[in-house]
Amino acid sequence: MEVPKKIGGLRRIVRAGKFSWQGFVHGLKDEPAFRQEFIVSVLTLPLLFFIDAPLFAKVLVLISHLFVMVTELLNSAMEKVVDIASPDYHDFAKAAKDMGSLAVFFSIVVCGICWTYLFFA
């Protein structure tokens, strides 16, 4: 694999956007958990337009959904790196993956708390 040349300015921003888009497509295509969380967000976030609640609460819910997806993507990326670095079973590799899973779980709990706040604010 060829290392890309370092560039700056607008070309760098465009290239970064392209890489981000590729990461998004990979997440949807190859990461079932990310795909599920994305679909849940696409189906539930439009409800924010119909709920009579403070704007702050709605923004909090939106941010919490993004937090879940960001955490899931970071967890998936970390798992891939662990799989390359430690193809055989290792207690440290398992611990790293378990902690990544816990981070995703915590982000989902935060999202649930935000939805609860939205309905009772």
Image: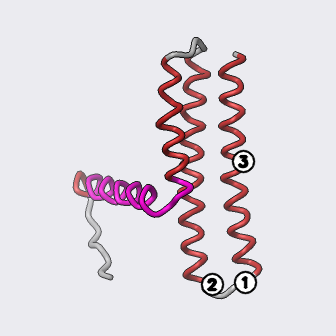
Could you tell me the amino acid type at mark 1? His
Q: Is residue 22 left or right of residue 39?
A: left
Residue nearer the viewer, 39 or 52: 39
x then y, percent, for residue 36: 54, 49
Q: Residue at x 32, y 78 (%)?
A: 3
In the rendered image, residue 79 lying in the magenta stretch gets the answer no
x then y, percent, for residue 45: 51, 30
Tell me the magenta residue range: 12-34
x then y, percent, for residue 58: 57, 23
Residue pointed to by mark 1 = 90
Q: Is residue 44 left or right of residue 103?
A: left
x then y, percent, for residue 94: 72, 74
Residue pointed to by mark 3 = 106
Q: Separation of disc 1 and disc 3 at Cα?
A: 24 Å
Could you tell me the amino acid type at mark 3? Phe
Q: Name the image quarter holding residue 4.
A: bottom left
Q: Are marks 2 and 1 in contact (CB under 8 Å)?
A: yes
Q: Earlier in the sequence, mark 2 or mark 3?
A: 2
Q: Residue at x 66, y 28 (%)?
A: 115
Residue nearer the viewer, 82 or 36: 36
Residue pointed to by mark 2 = 86
In the rendered image, residue 22 lying in the magenta stretch gets the answer yes
Crowdedness of circle 1 by 10 Å Cα count: few (<14), some, many (20+)?
Answer: few
Q: Separation of disc 2 and disc 3 at Cα?
A: 26 Å
Could you tell me the amino acid type at mark 2? Ser
Q: Is residue 32 left or right of residue 106?
A: left
* Name of the residue lying farthest toward the left: 11
Q: Residue at x 33, y 57 (%)?
A: 16
